[in-house]
């Protein structure tokens, strides 16, 4: 088997190069090879100094995340790094690209550090629900003090090695020529007879005890009591670095790391890390090529259309916006300007760029203006008939090779493609609302959509800073269907004894930013009803219809599920009376508790997600998780609905669904995939590939 660490000796300098593509993660093979290479270098009498360098695009991206949650294989990372630090020959880390997490910890275990100024360094473990567990919390503060260490470890943000406080970690920062600089540095160490210099013995960062304690106190206050687990553990470990001898501090860090590693939260966040990498892996990526995109056409300047125009302009595209007549165009432009101004106030767009950005925009009332567009997004035309007509008209005006996309979540892409002579260029691009805030774009692929068109559309979405998720181009996208299932579960709970505010509170406590009824009031009840009907829940919307009939349309009419005034929303006894009256007709009354509420909502979403996987609508359950986290504020630390269902236990969720299905409503029947997984002792996560 090929070695993952290269070894060569050049004038008394042993160069150990990490060769574990794509990111030199510290998996078991690399750990074994690195240890062996070290032993060779230490035993070789001609070697005076050791240089550790990375091959490929970066030095090292840290521990191999796929190994976490499984039994450790020796040499485990902290022990390996201790061996590096204990080396009797000086060890120099030469860093390019990035040194992240365990990669940075490896550098800290070396005696000297040379790096490229633009290399990124940081401790992203917190985003995986972990802490730097290979000595980072003990070594880094000894060099940089508590403030910088906590800033890096609790935010998880990487910084340029040559910038600000990060410089303290490095002995030499070069613009380029890293290897030569490291070799010269090594020779100089030999000439000067400089000794090993162990970070465990460093005191610089601990010297100012008052500043250290101030930083700890500041972060403790900032994290508050109910903070997430990993930041609190990081704080305690960094505090321990100043209070405990190094080896005891290391044991303290180890215990905290082990606890976090076994937590549901870290498991879920690790799942999201891989799911977000996988979501980009689509079959079209292998065969397709992105076409050049300069001019974007948008038909319709309503909420979604204006949002798309704003995003495209902000990404530097020239945009042609087409509306049906001059008054509609004027309204669309007003909407667009409001969005651009809001982007400035949020810091998403500079005031300087805002001034010039409209020069890239052409507002028109005739589709002929789209003749030069490379991609046209249809954000107008409510129903299938209207959308079909627009696509047929578009076909007559656009140039060859233009990609035509429907922004509607309910568009049947195959049917739209048939209205054109360029079926291979037709697909769906569904941006979640609000377009400015949400990260999700569902790329809907029809039976004839070509690989080039799909790759072009996903590239466009990424240029807008979004996360594209591939779905089949049949009506109903991931977000719509899962949110509709969630709402159906909430309504069932209300009909069987819970109050809307109880459902909202239970789901907020579970981690959702808003409960389903609060969200419905924000969205508007008519929009919610339309979605429920489109997703086949028309038998389950009696309550919703009753509220709409009563003029309760949500926040915009100051009453919906709640009543609103200047002080915000409050529970409305009239709604409770309407619910009681409807319950009387259907005979509800089982008073579900908080965990019943949470479990039924999760079961409904997971079953709907499983249905989408079974139908081939999405490629893997992980794609659903990414979509719900990025587009629908599903709590990231739960890992998405499919991962959360795995954690909750598929068997118990399936049994709950079976109980619900006893009333004959097929929606509640567990889908076959769920049964198959349970029968075979498998989980949704096993289907992610
Ligand atoms: C840690 O270090 C714990 C220690 O403190 C303690 C240990 C005891 N492991 O993102 P890319 C895969 S925790 C395994 O497309 P880029 C990734 O899944 C770690 N796999 O590249 C993908 O696989 P695939 C702390 C990893 O150039 C492929 O590599 N470190 C790891 O866009 C390419 O990745 C982090 O959290 C890993 N550590 O971005 C850093 N990293 O091709 C995580 C990547 O099969 N990594 N992969 O889909 C990153 O943030 C980015 O990968 C990086 C490069 C910025 C480095």
Image (spheres, rainbow, N blue to C red):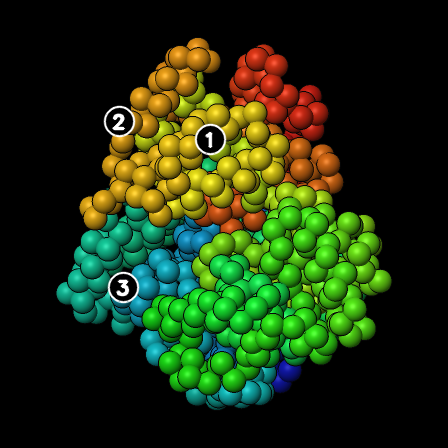
Q: Is mark 3 within 8 Å of ligand 1?
A: no
The image's mark for residue 85 is none
* Residue 606 in picture, x, y percent from top left: 57, 33
Q: Quadrant of residue 369?
A: bottom right
* Mark-to-mark CA distance, 3 and 1: 57 Å
The image's mark for residue 573 is 2
- Choose between 367 and 174: the one closer to the eye: 367
Residue 91 in view: no
Q: Quadrant of residue 576?
A: top left
* Mark-to-mark CA distance, 2 and 1: 18 Å
**Which residue sits at x=38%, y=72%?**
341
The mark that comes first in sequence, 3 or 2, is 3
Quadrant of the drawing holding the N terminus? bottom right
Q: Secondary structure at mark 1?
A: helix
Q: Secondary structure at mark 3?
A: helix
The mark that comes first in sequence, 3 or 1, is 3
Q: Is residue 236 above or below residue 4?
A: above
* Residue 27 in picture, x, y percent from top left: 61, 54
**Which residue sits at x=37%, y=64%?**
152
Give the residue number, with chain letter if any, for mark 3.
146
* Residue 488 in picture, x, y percent from top left: 51, 29
- Choose between 228 and 634: the one closer to the eye: 634
The mark that comes first in sequence, 2 or 1, is 1
- Choose between 339 and 328: the one closer to the eye: 328
- Which is more foreground, mark 2 or mark 1? 1
* Residue 360 in picture, x, y percent from top left: 55, 82
Give the residue number, with chain letter if any, for mark 1.
545
**Which residue sits at x=56%, y=49%?**
626
């Amino acid at each position: 088997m090929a070695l993952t660490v290269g070894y060569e000796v050049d004038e008394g300098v042993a160069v150990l190069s990490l060769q574990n593509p794509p990111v030199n993660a510290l998996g078991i093979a690399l750990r074994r090879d690195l240890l062996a290479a070290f032993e060779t270098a230490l035993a070789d009498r001609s070697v005076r100094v050791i240089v550790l360098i990375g091959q490929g695009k970066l030095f090292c991206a840290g521990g191999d995340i796929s190994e976490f949650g499984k039994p450790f294989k020796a040499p485990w990372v902290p022990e390996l790094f201790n061996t590096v630090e204990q080396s009797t020959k000086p060890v120099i880390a030469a860093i390019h690209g990035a040194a992240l997490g365990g990669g940075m910890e490896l550098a800290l275990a070396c005696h000297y550090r040379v790096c490229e100024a633009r290399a990124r360094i940081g401790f992203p473990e917190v985003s995986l629900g972990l802490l730097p567990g290979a000595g980072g919390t003990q070594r880094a503060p000894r060099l940089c003090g508590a403030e910088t260490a906590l800033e890096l470890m609790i935010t998880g943000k990487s910084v340029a090695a040559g910038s600000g406080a990060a410089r303290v970690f490095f002995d030499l920062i070069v613009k380029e020529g890293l290897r030569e600089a490291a070799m010269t540095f090594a020779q100089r160490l030999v000439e000067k007879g400089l000794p090993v210099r162990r970070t465990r013995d460093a005191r610089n960062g601990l010297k100012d005890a008052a500043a250290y304690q101030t930083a700890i106190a500041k972060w403790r206050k900032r994290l508050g009591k109910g903070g997430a687990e990993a930041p609190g553990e990081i704080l305690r470990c960094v505090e321990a670095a100043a209070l405990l001898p190094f080896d005891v501090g290391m044991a303290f860090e180890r215990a905290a790391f082990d606890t976090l590693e076994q937590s549901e939260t870290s498991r879920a966040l690790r799942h999201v890390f891989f799911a977000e990498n996988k979501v980009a892996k689509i079959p079209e990526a292998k065969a397709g090529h992105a076409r050049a995109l300069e001019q974007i056409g948008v038909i319709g300047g309503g909420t979604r259309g204006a949002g798309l125009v704003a995003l495209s302009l902000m990404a530097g595209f020239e945009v042609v916006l087409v509306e049906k007549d001059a008054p509609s165009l004027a309204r669309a432009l007003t909407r667009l300007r409001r969005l651009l101004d809001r982007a400035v106030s949020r810091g998403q767009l500079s005031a300087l760029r805002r001034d010039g950005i409209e020069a890239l925009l052409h507002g028109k009332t005739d589709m002929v203006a789209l003749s030069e567009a490379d991609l046209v997004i249809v954000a107008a035309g409510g129903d299938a008939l209207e959308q079909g007509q627009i696509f047929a008209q578009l076909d007559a005006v656009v140039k060859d090779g233009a990609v035509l996309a429907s922004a509607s979540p309910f568009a049947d892409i195959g049917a739209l493609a048939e209205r054109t002579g360029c079926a291979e260029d037709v697909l769906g691009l569904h941006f979640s609302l609000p377009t400015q805030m949400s990260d999700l774009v569902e790329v809907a692929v029809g039976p004839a959509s070509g690989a080039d068109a799909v790759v072009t559309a996903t590239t466009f979405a990424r240029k807008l800073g979004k996360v594209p998720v591939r779905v089949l181009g049949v009506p109903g996208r991931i977000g719509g269907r899962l949110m509709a299932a969630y709402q159906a579960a909430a309504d069932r709970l209300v009909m069987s004894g819970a109050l809307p505010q109880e459902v909202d509170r239970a789901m907020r406590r579970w981690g959702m930013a808003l409960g389903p009824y609060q969200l419905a009031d924000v969205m508007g009840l008519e929009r919610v009803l339309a979605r429920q009907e489109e997703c086949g829940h028309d038998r389950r919307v009696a309550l919703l219809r009753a509220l709409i009939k009563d003029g309760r349309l949500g926040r915009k009419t100051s009453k919906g599920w709640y009543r609103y005034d200047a002080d915000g929303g409050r529970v409305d006894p009239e709604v409770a009376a309407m619910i009681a009256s409807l319950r009387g007709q259907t005979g509800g009354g089982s008073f579900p508790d908080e965990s019943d509420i949470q479990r039924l909502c999760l079961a409904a979403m997971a079953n709907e997600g499983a249905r989408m996987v079974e139908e081939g609508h999405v490629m893997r359950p992980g794609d659903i998780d990414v979509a719900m986290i990025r587009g629908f504020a599903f709590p990231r630390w739960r890992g998405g609905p499919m991962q959360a269902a795995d954690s909750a236990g598929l068997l118990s969720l399936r049994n709950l669904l079976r109980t619900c299905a006893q009333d004959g409503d097929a929606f509640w029947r567990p889908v076959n995939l769920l049964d198959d997984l349970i029968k075979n002792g498998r989980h949704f996560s096993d289907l992610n590939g």
